[in-house]
Image: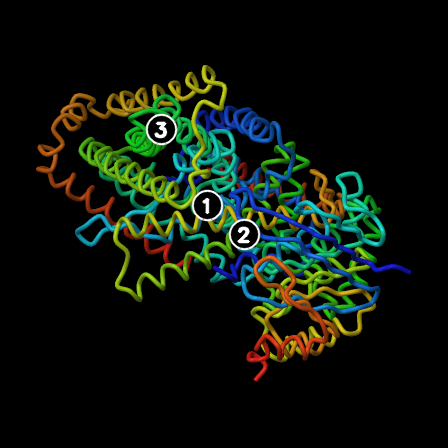
Amino acid sequence: MGPVVEVRSLKYSYPDGTEALKGVDFRLEAGEGVALLGANGSGKTTFALHLNGLLSGSGAVRICGMEVTPASLAAIRRKVGMVFQDADSQLFMPTVIEDVGFGLLNQGLAPEEVCERAQIALEQVGMVGTGSRAPHHLSAGEKRRVALAGILALDPEILVLDEPTTFLDPPGQRALSDLLRNLPQAKILITHDMPFALATCSRAVFFHDGSVAAEGPVEEIAARFGWGFAAR
Amino acid sequence: MRHNAVDEWSRGSSALHRRAPASKLIAAAVFLVVVATAHHHLPLLACGWLGLLLWVTLAARLPLGGILSRGAVVLPFSAVFALLSWMEGAPGIAVALILKSYLSALAVLLLVATTPLPELVRSLEAARVPRFLLTVVQFLYRYIFVVVEEAAHMRTAAAARGGLTFRAAADALAVLFARSFARAEAIHRAMIARGFDGHFRPLARRRFAPPDAVFLVLASALPLLVRTVGEVLL
Amino acid sequence: MHIPDGFLSTPVWATLDALALPATGFAARAAQRGFDESKAPLLGVMGAFIFAAQMINFPVGMGTSGHLVGGALLACTLGPAPASVVMTAILAIQAFVFQDGGVLALGPNVLNMAVAGVLAGYLPYHLWGGGRFRRAAIFAGGVLSVLASAVLALSELLLSGVRMPPSVLAVSLGLFLVSALLEGAITMAVVSALERIQPGFVRQPASAPALLLGGLGLFAVLLAAGGVVFASTAPDGIDSLAIRSGIAKPLAAYGSGASVAGVVLIFLLLLAGGRMMRRRSA
């Protein structure tokens, strides 16, 4: 079986002309966890937005062997689940259960089945019994979990998480890394949090100025770029 | 703001909380119309209606003091106009303004304190309120808490530097505007990432059950009964 | 000014509710045209922004401050129909959740603020927003927006038989003018600041059906003007001559004890309103 994500010489410029990605190559195997490291503005998030076609630049992006094109977008977005950095922007429905069920309803499933699968997803992230609550009544950690449940409910093959530990206290970070480690999906984590990256990923890719500067085991990459500082 | 009391109250589990939102919406509308169209013996009728509202409050296991004082937010406004009318030699109008505005505010408050807003919004859809407008209302309610918190941070930061000048306040609002715009884009992106194709699909439809019909008939008849009895007896 | 329930007479609220329904439907369809429901989050978040904007105080000297109302700002940035939808949504939330404005009075409030207020706020921008008088047009939009809403609300109250001493009426019209000028200044300042941050936010006028909008805006302004005339000749035994002279010479009206009491009352009202707003948002 080939890689679940395969990106070749991806280039992207923002409408204002800023070159955000200058030819990125990337591979992700099934079940693998990769941390995307690098300074703010080095292109990590821009790169991630290409994985399910929210942005499209030049070069090739293949998800589970499928080229990302306008025609394949619906199928691609079922394979790639994205948890965005700001949980408040991700949890836009009025109640938790409606939010977790949002993607399933868009797939055309019947409301009964949606409720059932949404409950299972909430169970997976340890948020049973919160279905009728409003997102603005949840803590930062709870929001993060519910946002993840909304993605897990769709049963994607690849999880992309952007800065998942922001606003989480240390116990919350530990709980999240335990949760992620036990998920079978392939994972891409954009993070500055080295203990978290070490706990959840085996490999790291270091972005610098829109290109991949290096990749290898997390410890090695962190040490090489002085990125381990946050861990001490 | 973050924990709006109404939000908290609406998640109760009394028999009233369990009634279909549409039945409560119609009952509240009937109450408002009955009160608005009454002209005679208002103080006496108001006692009867207030009694009904208090009964509903207790039956819904809502805090009496909380409901009464929150409904009173209309009173400063009403009191000004009541005093003005009084000064113009129309004490009847003055009394009517106070009583009617307070009773109406209480009735609406009881509606939203027994019905979570998302359910209320869905029942309004059945009343043929444009769906697009309701979707906007739903998003507005969801993000009030988030954006107000951002504004509160800005205000605190400004206060720490000794307050805002006119121009700095305009800059602050422009930044808040830009952030809100960016947030809307992030929301839209998150929706598309989960397969949104331009149409919201409801998760569950609330059915109108026999107890809801019984409640609707009773709750609509009682305020009317109070008014009829009052007007016939006096 | 959000009119609570119990203030308007049945013919007034019933008529205005009946008018507000098709107007809201029209605005919702117009705002949705060319888009699908994916436009809803933007309008919802901008509504939340207008809510939150009330927490940012603009100092105007003498220890007082004002805040943005927003109709004209939204009209210049989102366009008139979406702005109208946003304002309607705000009024609905305020009426239901915050007991600020009535539910039977929602139609009148929507017509005053979300229809007349937005159209009056958009009209000058639509006519002169592209040219040399752009800043003046934005300022005028803010002024007209608040003036139209306030005068309509006042005339609806008077039409419903709410009584007011003529001098108080003159003073409140004066206060409306002051808050209208403030809204104009705030709107202009915020639009300028937005154009510095990112020019794309403020749309260029003339992308809307010109004739229809111009006509509607003019109608709103005329309606407001009619409201002023009506207010000054209000029925119910108010001596219209006295009011006319009160409007013409507001300073002369300060003499009588009644008007002083009226001014004090209105200030108390504004104060109480401000306090409540602050407590709610705290």
Q: CA distance from mark 2 to mark 3?
A: 30 Å
Within 10 Å of disc 3 (Cα), the crowding (few <14, some 14-19, many 20+) is: many
| Residue carrying label 3 | C152
**Residue identifier under label 2:** B143
Q: Where's residue B40, x and y in %?
A: 42, 35
Question: Would residue B187 be found to the left or right of residue C94 on screen?
Answer: right
Residue A224, percent from left and from top: 62, 77
Residue under label 1, please give it.
B46
Residue drawn at (63%, 76%) of the image: A222
In whole angstroms, how far apart are the C-alphas of marks 2 and 1? 37 Å
Q: Earlier in the sequence, mark 2 or mark 1?
A: 1
Viewport quadrant of the C terminus of chain A: bottom right
Count how many numbered circles sit on residues in the image: 3
The kind of secondary structure element at disc 3 is: helix
Against C210, is B63 above or below? below
**Where is residue A48 shown, x and y percent of the image?**
67, 56
Query: Which quarter of the figure has residue C171?
Result: top left
Amino acid marked by disc 1: Ala
Q: Assign the N terminus of chain A to one quadrant of the image.
A: bottom right
Which residue occupies 36% across, 39% down?
A: C191
Residue contact at pointers 3 and 1, CB within 8 angstroms: no
- Same chain for mark 2 and mark 1? The answer is yes
Farthest right residue?
A: A1
Check disc 1: other Cα within 10 Å, few if <14, some if 14-19, many if 20+: many
Relative depth, front residue between C188 and A81 = A81
Element on which disc 1 rests = helix
Q: Which mark is residue B120?
A: none
